[in-house]
Amino acid sequence: MTSSVLQAKQRFGIIGNAPALTAAIERAIRVAPIDLSVLVTGESGSGKEFFPQIIHAFSSRKHARYIAVNCGAIPEGTIDSELFGHEKGAFTGAVDSRKGYFEEANGGTIFLDEVAELPLTTQARLLRVLESGEFIKVGSSTVQKTNIRVVAATNVDLLRAVADGRFREDLYYRLSTVQIHIPPLRDRGSDIRLLTHRFAADFAERYRMPEVTFAEDADDTMRHYRWPGNVRQLKNVVEQIALFEGGSIVTAATLRSYLPDISASYMPVAGGAAHSYEREREMLLSMVFNLQQRLDKMQAQLDSFGRREPDDIYAPADDSRKVFPTSIVVRQPAQPVPLDTAPCSDVNYSEVLPDEKPATLEAGEREMIRRALERHEGRRKAAAGELNISERTLYRKIKEYGLE
């Protein structure tokens, strides 16, 4: 371990000796003097926020400004203004001109956390800054220049986001000139024990409480736990234990009462990848299509009850004419369609049963969004409420499916 790595650990309070962690710090220090864009990847809670600070501190920009921006915490309607600024009167509420982060941090470093959450329009503006150093304030036509270094971070698989059309491919390659991957806590071995005892000691010192100690079986349990929330989760758990078990020896049995769903957390994650909601989305859409099929069966059954064949309705009285019979015989189908759901008189089949089933899950999602917008006459807030999604997600889906 080099002196620079030790210096970075001490300065930013990074605890651990795992080879993968040390390699990530060395990589950050090595790229720091070179003005290249850097993409930091890793699971949520793994400590990605320290690495842009390391890069800034070991670069020639260390005396200039460093600004960290959480892209996922800024509403879509105002994020362009936050990043690039706006002119007076550019939109409702813009009573004065305002500088954006890219102008404020001129000469320094800007850290874009959760960069995958940027809307596509903002991604295009960011790409221009990376390529030419130029940007335009919201409501302005004047091109401005900025000299800035961009470090981005995400816990999302950006290549998958590119394939799904949620992230620009050209921006991905611009941002990921150099990539630094932060290992998850479960892959850091003995670092878990070091962090556990450090967090417990810090808590006891800060609040002047008796310090807890951890039995060997507790340390072993912690080492084998998955820690889906990584270092952030470990700190929260240790501080809870330090509060309620102060002065005692924590055993594995005591520890388990503070660990949520330990059996599930021991289960391996395929490829060690971060949790994805794509599978959950597919399951929900599959449930919708299954309901649709059941409604199809119900409609077929109702249609069969009301169907009259010509030879049932009219019985020949003589060779010249047919008369309506005194009793009507309704022909039942040879093999009745089973009813999975009792018929409901207030079901509007014209809405819930489209003429053609969607060929793909994406087509089904698009159709549900289109119908919700139609029912609410284009009011996106009401449609989002019906679909149980955020307005921001609905806005992105509208653009993605061309439903403007």
Image (tube, grey):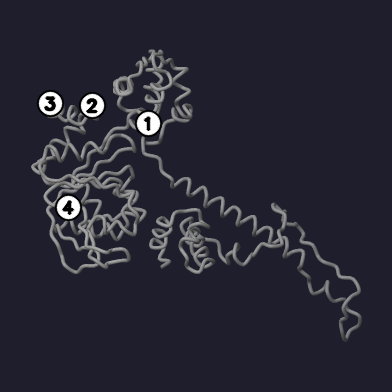
Instruction: Kindly indicate the quadrant of the structure image that contains residue 351.
Output: bottom right
Of residue 83 and residue 173, the one placed in the foreground of this image is 83
Answer above or below: position of 3 versus 104: above
Q: Which mark is residue 2?
A: 3
Residue drawn at point x = 16 percent, y = 57 percent: 131
Question: Looking at the image, is mark 4 or mark 3 earlier in the sequence?
Answer: 3
Q: Amino acid at mark 2?
A: Pro
Question: Looking at the rendered structure, which numbered label has been put on residue 233?
Answer: 1
Secondary structure category for the residue under label 3: loop
User: Can you tell which of label 2 and label 1 is closer to the viewer?
Assistant: 1
Of the two numbered discs 4 and 2 on the same chain, state the one appearing first in sequence.
Answer: 2
Camera-nearest residue between 109 and 192: 109
Residue drawn at (46%, 45%), measured in percent from left and top?
279
Determine the secondary structure under disc 2.
Answer: helix
Using the numbered discs, state the Cα–Cα distance from disc 4 to disc 1 in whole angstroms. 34 Å
- Residue bearing the label numbered 4: 104
Percent x, y of residue 9: 19, 28
Q: Is residue 88 left or right of residue 241?
A: left
Residue 82 rendering spot, x and y as whole percentages: 26, 55
Determine which quarter of the picture holds residue 240: top left
Q: As rendered, which of 8 and 157 lies closer to the eye?
A: 8
Dot 1, crowdedness within 10 Å: few (<14), some or many (≥20)?
some
Q: Which mark is residue 19?
A: 2
